[in-house]
Every structure is written in C-alpha cells, then in structure tokens.
Amino acid sequence: MLRTRIIPCLLLRNGSLVKTKRFGKFNYIGDPANTCRIFNELEVDELTILDISASKEKRIPSYNVLQEITNECFMPVSYGGGISSVKAAERVFKMGFEKVILNSSALKNPHLIRELSKAFGSQSIIVAIDVKKNFIGKQQCRGVSGKLNSKKLPMEWAKQVQDLGAGEILLTSIDREGTWSGFDLELVKSVSDAVTIPVIANGGAGCINHIGEAVKLGNASAVALGSMVVYQKKGMGVLVNFPDKKQLKKVLQ
C-alpha cells in the first residue's frame, strides 16, 4: 500500500463513464461497474466517482447506477454530484460509499458543509474546489461543471470549507484537466499550505513524475488521476490501468 494515496477519478455522465478536457469536450470511456471490477483487479486503494451532469441538470444522483458501482467495489469509494441535502448524502452512505463530495451545492449553501459534517463526521466530507483563471489570469472557484463563477478565491474558499467542517479538499485545475500537461503546482501549493486538512491534487497528470511533483513541490496529501488511468497514453485509445506501484514509490520517496 502506498503512503501517498493515488486515486482514480472517474466521471459519470448519463450513466456512462466519460473523460473530459478542461471540463468541456468529452469522450466515452465505458461501463462504470465493469471499470470498477478492473480497478478491483488492479488492487487500487481508493476510488472517486463524480457525476458531472447532476448539478448542471439540477437533479438528484443516479442512485441505481451508484448501487451497481458499490456492488462491484472492494475499495473505499467517494461520490460527488447532485448532493444538496443531508437526506441525499445519507442515501449515498447507506449504499456503501465512504465519503461524499460537495461542490456546487457548497458554493450556493456553505452551511451544508457544516450540516453534513455534524451528521456524518468531517472525515467523510470532501469539498471539491474547481478553479479556473479568468481573462486577466486570476484564479477563481467554479461550480456547475465550471459554468458558475463564484468569484471566490481558492485559498480563501479552502480556509472557509475547512472551518465549516470539511475533512478533505479535492482541488482541480480546470485549465489543466485532461491536458496531460502536469498539475498547476502553484495552485496546489497555495491551497495545500493554506489549510491543515488533506488536499487531493487533480487535473493535468500525464506521467508518474507529475505525481511526484504534486506531492513534493505542491505539498499535496494525495493525487487524483483521470486520463492516465483510462487511456493507454496521450492520443491513444481507452485502456483502464493504474501506474506501476514500484515506480510510484520511487517518485514519492
């Protein structure tokens, strides 16, 4: 088991897995349950599932799809998308998910973080912070798959969600997501250094060295991977995989 968590991050859209680029154009990846079975075989320690259309479509989570996923997963799984109440989170937990992820609903109603933290414990609440530069290069937090600009600054919002009871932050650079170009290390470090809770770096990983950079230079507590675990290589076809653990240990030493 790796000391630093390396977490496949899978994107749901209309019941299927897809992969996006900068939260825009997407490609079909495959069936969620079957993909989870493959990650079981690869002995992945943890998994994240994000429904990228739930908040945009103003709907509840696709509970039938989520149940299929938890029926197949032998590892801890976190889920985000369409969770806007304690009741919705409770249903997700009862299905077997260990953590829930808030983004758009937390931006609209920050006190939801406190409500869920009190009900289920901060260790089970992740707040996703999606960040995009505006036209003058200023980093701002986004919601609703990047469509909603909250105008909140990443470090300030990170401190606020920590104070409200979040147990972790999933930090995504929209500008880097799906590009294979590496993490926004300046962003990762600024947020990681601003809070004491774990920060999961997401968006841009293209090689094992990028993972090491996020941890060593960005001070991330964990790393989420998208393209690297669903494609053979950049520009090539779908192949569900996971980086070699010996190589990971080497870059994380």
Image (cartoon, helix red, strand yellow):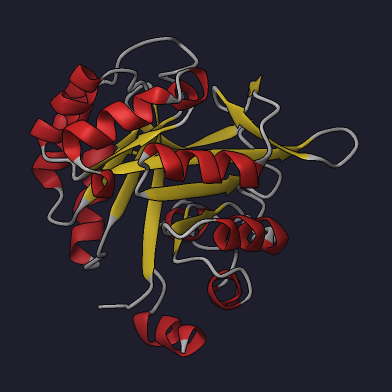
Q: Quadrant of the N terminus?
A: bottom left
Residue at x 51% of width, y 56% of height: 195
In the rendered image, residue 62, in percent from the top left (x then y), is placed at 26, 20
In this view, the residue in front, 177 or 186, is 186
In this view, the residue in front, 65 or 110, is 110
Residue at x 71% of width, y 38% of height: 132
Residue at x 44% of width, y 66% of height: 221
- The answer to whether residue 234 of the structure is visible from this angle is no
In the rendered image, residue 106, in percent from the top left (x then y), is placed at 45, 26
In this view, the residue in front, 230 or 60, is 60
* Residue 12 position (above or below residue 223): above
- The answer to whether residue 125 of the structure is visible from this angle is yes
In this view, the residue in front, 44 or 147, is 147
In the rendered image, residue 111, in percent from the top left (x then y), is placed at 40, 24
Q: On the picture, is 145 further left or further right than 63?
A: right
Q: On the picture, is 72 further left or further right than 28?
A: left
Q: Quadrant of residue 152?
A: top right
Q: On the picture, is 174 further left or further right than 192?
A: right
Q: Quadrant of residue 136?
A: top right
Q: On the picture, is 66 further left or further right than 225?
A: left
Q: In this view, which residue lies farthest toward the top?
A: 58
* Residue 231 position (above or below residue 61): below
* Residue 194 position (above or below residue 215): above
Q: In this view, which residue lies farthest toward the front?
A: 163
In the rendered image, residue 43, in percent from the top left (x then y), is placed at 21, 68
Residue at x 27% of width, y 45% of height: 122
Q: How many marks?
A: 0
